[in-house]
Image (cartoon, helix red, strand yellow):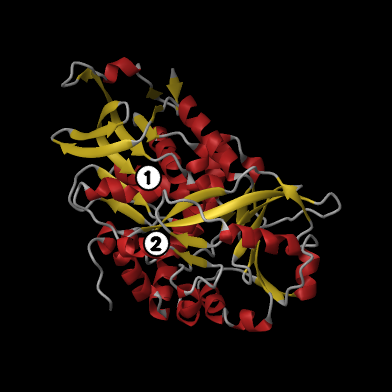
């Protein structure tokens, strides 16, 4: 059987060897831990380069952050959450009075390194540096999505729709002047629409906005969960193997890595850690304490009213701190702001309930299409940039996590970067700014 040209897929039994308990230990060239967009894209890119790949993931599709994404693939996604505008909103954030952010105070001491570094990053100089670093990654994102969609058979779900940031007042628009300046300096295309032009561009909007910014180079993925499913099928068809279980430990050895999971042990020459917000737990036992946090977010699907025009592109309502994204001609996904809390803490629906009320005044909505709200945890770094690169103190371990809000968007290009690293090649996208070392230990306030 031949796949990807000349790659020969050997029988699974050829990779077994006796374990210490008498059972067989499965073997692979490389293990990829995490089945979200980053992990799947990495596994597919590695298979395409001829490596024997085992993907380790519990298989809980709805639990993956990629499943609940707004689907935005934008060259302009270069502005991290830690913006200089944070300081003006800080009192409201502390009181949980701004829907963009909800703090769970008992959890905050556990992410003190993240919070310290996050506040230090909320300066104009750092914001500009991060934008310059992220631009090559986001600029390559859409083309990588096109390549992946062509292989997975999902080109009908990817389109250059643009996306809109809508402002309810002229004051709110003026307050985003620095954002527009940075985008313009980096050649990110956008158009400013007044209220009438915005309504003409998106007739589904019934709320009156003062103006909007249309990012014209942006694409979107309709129903990101379907893309994930297609990538899973493609991985299986390509001869990739899968372990449906949680990885509990990574142990380095003389011949590679021992990957302990719910069902046993896997021996791999290399490991890619792309487990999103769970990555920090696995790195801790290896001596890496990353300043990262879980940014929880919620969504719910609603039908559009039968008499409503379709929504053609995602819309960020800056006044509601929420996004409405089309998932088809007659349904939309409403997404909440950020909640800083433990990954497995009890859900708090206050933000998504507020976002849903606002959405009902923004579009002509029908009823909800879900029995319950969706909840996922984004792997967030304080400077808003992912962790991509070789582990500083361990051979054969590649980090690929911490993408925050751009995991779905930059997942396919990250997968290509990971495959280059595993093959000892120089990635096409510069990754020095994403080096793991920058987030290790307790950061200093500079």
Q: Position of residue 19 (x, y in %)?
A: 19, 21
Residue closer to the observer: 329 or 20? 20
Drawn side of residue 382 relative to residue 200, left or right: left
Residue closer to the observer: 442 or 433? 442
Gap between marks 2 and 1 measured at Cα: 16 Å
Drawn side of residue 411 relative to residue 433, left or right: right
Q: Position of residue 311 (x, y in %)?
A: 74, 56
**What residue sits right under mark 2 in the picture?**
385
> Circle 2 sits in a helix, a strand or a loop, which is it?
loop
> Circle 1 sits in a helix, a strand or a loop, which is it?
loop
Q: Quadrant of residue 219?
A: bottom right
Q: Residues within 10 Å of mark 1 (few under 14, many from 20)?
A: many
Q: Could you tell me which residue is drawn at 54 percent across and 50 percent down?
A: 143
**What residue sits right under mark 1 in the picture?**
275
Q: The C terminus lies in which quarter of the figure?
A: bottom left
Residue at far right of view: 307
Q: The N terminus lies in which quarter of the figure?
A: top left
């Amino acid at each position: 059987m031949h796949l990807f040209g000349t790659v020969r897929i050997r029988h699974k039994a050829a990779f077994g060897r006796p374990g210490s308990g008498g059972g067989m230990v499965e073997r692979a060239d490389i293990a990829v831990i995490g089945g979200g967009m980053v992990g799947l894209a990495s596994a597919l890119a590695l298979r395409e380069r001829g490596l024997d790949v085992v993907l380790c993931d519990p298989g809980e599709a709805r639990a993956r952050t990629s499943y609940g994404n707004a689907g935005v693939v934008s060259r302009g996604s270069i502005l991290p959450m830690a913006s200089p505008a944070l300081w003006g909103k800080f009192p409201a954030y502390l009181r949980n009075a701004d829907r963009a952010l909800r703090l769970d105070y008992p959890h905050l001491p556990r992410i003190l390194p993240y919070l310290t570094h996050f506040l230090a990053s909320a300066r104009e100089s750092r914001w500009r540096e991060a934008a310059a670093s992220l631009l090559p990654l986001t600029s390559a994102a859409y083309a990588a999505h096109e390549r992946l969609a062509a292989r997975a058979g999902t080109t009908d779900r990817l389109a250059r729709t643009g996306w809109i940031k809508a402002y309810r007042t002229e004051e709110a628009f003026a307050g985003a002047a620095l954002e527009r300046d940075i985008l313009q300096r980096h050649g990110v295309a956008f158009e400013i629409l007044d209220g009438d032009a915005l309504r003409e561009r998106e007739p589904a909007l019934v709320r009156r906005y003062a103006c909007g910014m249309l990012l014209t180079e942006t694409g979107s993925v309709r129903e990101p969960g379907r893309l994930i499913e297609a990538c899973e099928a493609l991985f299986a068809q390509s001869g990739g193997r899968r372990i449906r279980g949680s990885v509990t430990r990574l142990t380095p050895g003389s011949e590679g890595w021992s990957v302990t999971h719910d069902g046993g042990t896997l021996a791999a020459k290399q490991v890619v850690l792309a487990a999103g917000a769970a990555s920090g737990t696995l790195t801790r036992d290896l001596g890496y304490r990353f300043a990262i946090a879980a940014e929880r977010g919620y969504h719910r699907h609603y039908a559009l009213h039968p008499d409503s025009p379709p929504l053609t592109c995602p819309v960020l309502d800056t006044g509601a701190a929420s996004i409405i994204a089309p998932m088809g001609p007659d349904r939309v996904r409403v997404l909440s702001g950020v909640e800083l809390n433990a990954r497995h803490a009890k859900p708090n629906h206050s933000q998504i309930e507020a976002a849903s009320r606002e959405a009902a005044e923004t579009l002509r909505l029908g009823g909800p299409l879900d029995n319950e709200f969706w909840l996922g945890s984004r792997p967030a770094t304080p400077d808003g940039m992912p962790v991509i690169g070789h582990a500083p103190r361990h051979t054969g371990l590649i980090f690929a996590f911490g993408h925050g809000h751009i995991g779905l968007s930059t997942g396919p290009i990250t997968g290509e970067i990971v495959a280059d690293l595993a093959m000892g090649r120089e990635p096409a996208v510069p990754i020095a700014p994403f080096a793991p070392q920058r987030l290790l230990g307790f950061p200093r306030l500079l």
